[in-house]
Amino acid sequence: MISHFYTASMNIKTFGTAGRYIQGPGVLQLVGEIVRSYNIKKPIVFAGRRAMDTIERHGLFDSLNQSGAIFTREVFGAGSCGPEACDEEIQRLSEIGRADGCDAVIAAGGGKAIDTGKAVADNLNVPIIVIPTIASTDAPCSAIAIIYTCDHVFKGVRFCPRNPDAVLVDTKIIAEAPPMFLACGIGDAMGKYTEVPAALRAGAKNRLVKPVHGYPTLLAAAAQKLMVDTLFTYAEEAIESVELGVVTPALEAVVEAVTLLSQVAFEAGGLSAAHSIYGGFTVLETDPRYKNSFPCHGGLVFFGALVEMVMDGYPRDEIVRVMEFGHRVGLPINLEELGFRDIADDELKKVAEAATKPGRTIHNRVYRVTPETVLSAIKVANEIGLTVAEKIPRREFRRKSTV
């Protein structure tokens, strides 16, 4: 049965995802074949220092050498702003790629490196191959780059004219990463638990802005449902797999849900409050009390989804069920767990005001949202989260021996 949130219409509908999506253990070694098939001769390859070590250890540069490609290798974050998806780093890498005559971008790492890669590829007007080394966001397949200031305050969204040409997700690499990253990815994906239905109910346009901004497709609504079902079924076992450092069918399913299904759901479906609330919280990141222990993107988006559930009047039983799920996979469900133990009302008011600025996706809903609406919902979601935390302990991540 078609989602009851989806209203059939004659509006212009748009859909987009990666040109090729390749997932499985060891697929990183296929990058040379991808480069050859796309007739790429001289890519710029960049990743953060840790991610660079990972892709080298797993054979990316060996594969490129075998393909005959001549590549420029650069460390993401070597500029003055460090590893940040900001205009300064985008410009620096674009200038290197342009000076070296690069005909493609290969961006590896987490969401910041990937979003930077999309912006650089857009600047150079060349193809991009994305290689996530952690499954912490749905950035790899999207045409969106989230841009921050040099000190990581949300600045805006850059809409690229096309999605990445190829995405390679090596689940062996994902399994070796700290389990916290996968939990963050699950949290980011679970934001669409509330956001996509809210956007569909409101009849809002989706997040595929260029070259034509249209409305959601049936496939987006179906992807959201499949994503949610997959996460509720396999997420806990997938976390267990990463704690053991092994690839399992459960991990494969959750990585696909986080990386591919979540992207289809939000970009072809639409966003609403959870991500706006995340953006609101980033105004606190420059505060010395939070700067060194700021929660991950997915953790804040997940809490944003809980706030959205309160705003939209979800039954308390459902809110509690989602919170219990979050704790079983290690996600925060209240302000204290997010690291905002002694946050004052005036600070939360600033968060709510930032989340409800004109143009934010929180306004994709059937009623008017104000800062007071958000502030009240944050307080109630936090109170429910504190109650649930007393009954269901939050998962503590650990590495286990497989011997």
Image (cartoon, rainbow, N blue to C red):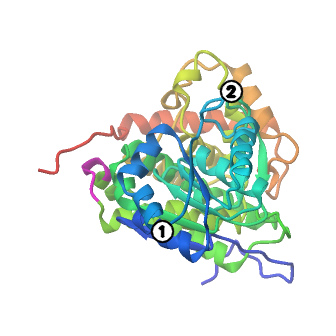
**141 or 377: which is nearer to us?**
141
Residue 322 at x, y percent in the picture: 49, 52
Residue 327 at x, y percent in the picture: 41, 44
Instruction: Name which residue lies at 58% across and 42% down.
Output: 297
Instruction: Name which residue lies at 56% across and 24% down.
Output: 340
**111 or 319: which is nearer to us?**
111
Q: Is residue 85 above or below residue 203?
A: above
For marks 2 and 1, give the CA distance: 39 Å
- Quadrant for residue 342, please give it: top right
Q: Is residue 393 left or right of residue 362?
A: left
Instruction: Name which residue lies at 11% across and 50% down.
Output: 403
Residue 60 at x, y percent in the picture: 43, 58
Residue beneath label 1, please? 67
Q: Amino acid at mark 2?
A: Asp
Residue 243 at x, y percent in the picture: 29, 47
Q: Nearer the viewer, mark 2 or mark 1?
A: 1
Secondary structure beneath dot 1 equals helix
Q: Is residue 342 above or below residue 281?
A: above
**151 or 68: which is nearer to us?**
68
Q: Main secondary structure of the magenta part?
A: helix
In the image, which residues are magenta? 242-246
The reply to whether the magenta stretch includes residue 245 is yes
- Quadrant for residue 142, please give it: bottom right
Residue 311 visible in rendering: no
How many badges with numbers are in the image? 2
Q: Amino acid at mark 1?
A: Ser
Secondary structure beneath dot 2 equals loop
Label of residue 151 in the image? 2
The reply to whether the magenta stretch includes residue 124 is no
**208 or 71: which is nearer to us?**
71
